[in-house]
Image (cartoon, rainbow, N blue to C red):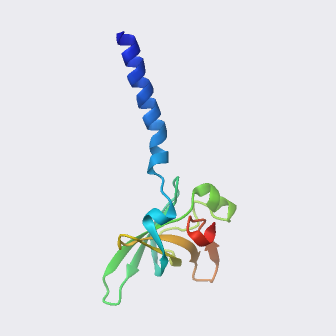
Amino acid sequence: MRTKLIGLIGGAGLFLSATAPALAHHSFAAEFDANQPVTIEGTVKEFRWVNPHSWLHINVTKPDGTVEEWAVEGGAPSALLRRGWTRDTLPPGTKVVVQGFMAKDGSHRANARDITFPDGTKLDAASSSPDQQ
């Protein structure tokens, strides 16, 4: 009986650990507002090449000189690769302009549609925004 209980608990633990990433994934509409486009201009602090979505952290200098950090969600690494990205596309210090959509909660988060570099190069962010599907 004890062996069956241990097996049952172990199996449940494996099941829950396997489904956790799926439960953590969300749709665009759950977190972002397609009616709230935003343009964010700043300097790359960090680019996280992670699944299920990449994350770009940008320092934005406001007119009064203070700096806000924005977290911008992009597509999965596999989708970014298909659009010409590498994990080294956005090194810290790179100036960028991000076109995307605001978070519904009003925080300094957005979902990127595309990213433009100082030389005018524009890359599709492979995001989950409605106009990307």
Q: Residue at x 48, y 40 (%)?
A: 19
Q: Which sits in the foreground, 65 or 15?
A: 15
The image quadrant where one finds the N terminus is: top left
Q: In this figure, what is the number of numbered marks?
A: 0
In the displayed structure, 36 sits above or below 81; it is below
The image quadrant where one finds the C terminus is: bottom right
Q: Which sits in the foreground, 87 or 124?
A: 124
Q: Quadrant of residue 76?
A: bottom right
Q: Quadrant of residue 128?
A: bottom right
In the displayed structure, 118 sits above or below 77; it is below
In the displayed structure, 36 sits above or below 12; it is below
Q: Quadrant of residue 84?
A: bottom right
Q: Residue at x 49, y 78 (%)?
A: 35
Please provide percent x and percent y for residue 13.
Answer: 41, 30
Q: Which sits in the foreground, 34 or 124?
A: 34
Q: Residue at x 42, y 28 (%)?
A: 12
Please provide percent x and percent y for residue 63.
Answer: 35, 90
Please provide percent x and percent y for residue 3.
Answer: 39, 12
Find the residue positioned furthest to the top. Answer: 1
Q: Which sits in the foreground, 28 or 57?
A: 28
Please provide percent x and percent y for residue 17.
Answer: 44, 37
In the displayed structure, 72 sits above or below 81; it is below
